[in-house]
Amino acid sequence: MTAETERGQSRQPEDGEPSAMVPARLRRLNRWLVEDLRDDLADLYAESRTTAPGDAYRSPSRQNLLNRLTADMRRPGFAMVIAETDSLMGCAFGFPVRGDGSWWLGFDGALPRGIEQLTVSGNVFAFADILIRPHPQDRELARRVQERLLTDHQATLGATLVDRADHPTLAVLRSWGWLDIGELRRPLGATTFRALVLTLGERTTARLEGLVTMPGGGGPGGA
């Protein structure tokens, strides 16, 4: 889901790589245009999912991404935003969360009140994946594509699920302002996920923690 670069460090663009000074254009794609970009999206996935040396977690395959993309494209409200210069630099895609709360099925414990209310009111958008090519301004680019999807859907909260063993992705999402609110496991599923949320606009830790206050005054779940 993320670009695995060391945060706080920059590097010079390699030969053939767009300069970090060139602003990326954002473009929303319909299902037919997504089909035309499947190979490019698989390449972007491979670049953005480079595993650090010594990391025991192994990212799912390119085909896994394409299989998930095919399934997600059938969901009502599916949308994708890409960022491009002279090449594909990043993308994010997902779908609106249904007001019946079924997306949260398997959440460990009580769903925070604020999130439950936003779900019922139709203000939550699920990010199936966020892919950003590693470059010095990848964090800013991630912010732009995330906010574009939320704005387009008039959503005030983004939500995503990450394999709890995928520590690199969890670390990068947290550095981008996502808040980890607890664990979720689908019925009959083998994977335990961390559930994360992101607010549109001001994304301070204080605001997020206020949003996900648990019943009885408890805080959100940790890592």
Image: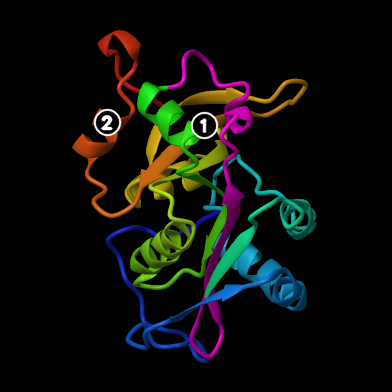
User: Taking the image as drawn, is residue 50 in sight?
Assistant: no
Name the residue located 39 percent from the left edge and 88 percent from the top edge.
19
Q: Position of residue 172 (x, y in %)?
A: 41, 50
Q: Position of residue 82 (x, y in %)?
A: 54, 73
Q: Position of residue 79 (x, y in %)?
A: 61, 62
Q: Amino acid at mark 1?
A: Arg
Label at residue 194: 1
In this picture, is 39 found above or below 127? below
In the displayed structure image, the side of residue 100 where residue 26 appears, left or right? left
Q: Position of residue 32 (x, y in %)?
A: 75, 74
Tell which circle, 1 or 2, labels the residue nearer the N-terminal end. Answer: 1
| Quarter of the view holding residue 171 | top left
Name the residue located 62 percent from the left edge and 73 percent from the top edge.
29
187 is within the stretch colored magenta: no
In the displayed structure image, the side of residue 98 where residue 115 appears, left or right? left
How far apart are the alpha carbons under marks 1 and 2? 16 Å
Q: Magenta stretch?
A: 83-111
In this picture, is 58 found above or below 69? above
Q: Nearer the viewer, residue 219 or 200?
A: 200
Q: Nearer the viewer, residue 43 or 199?
A: 199
Q: Amino acid at mark 2?
A: Glu
Label at residue 209: 2
Q: Nearer the viewer, mark 1 or mark 2?
A: 2
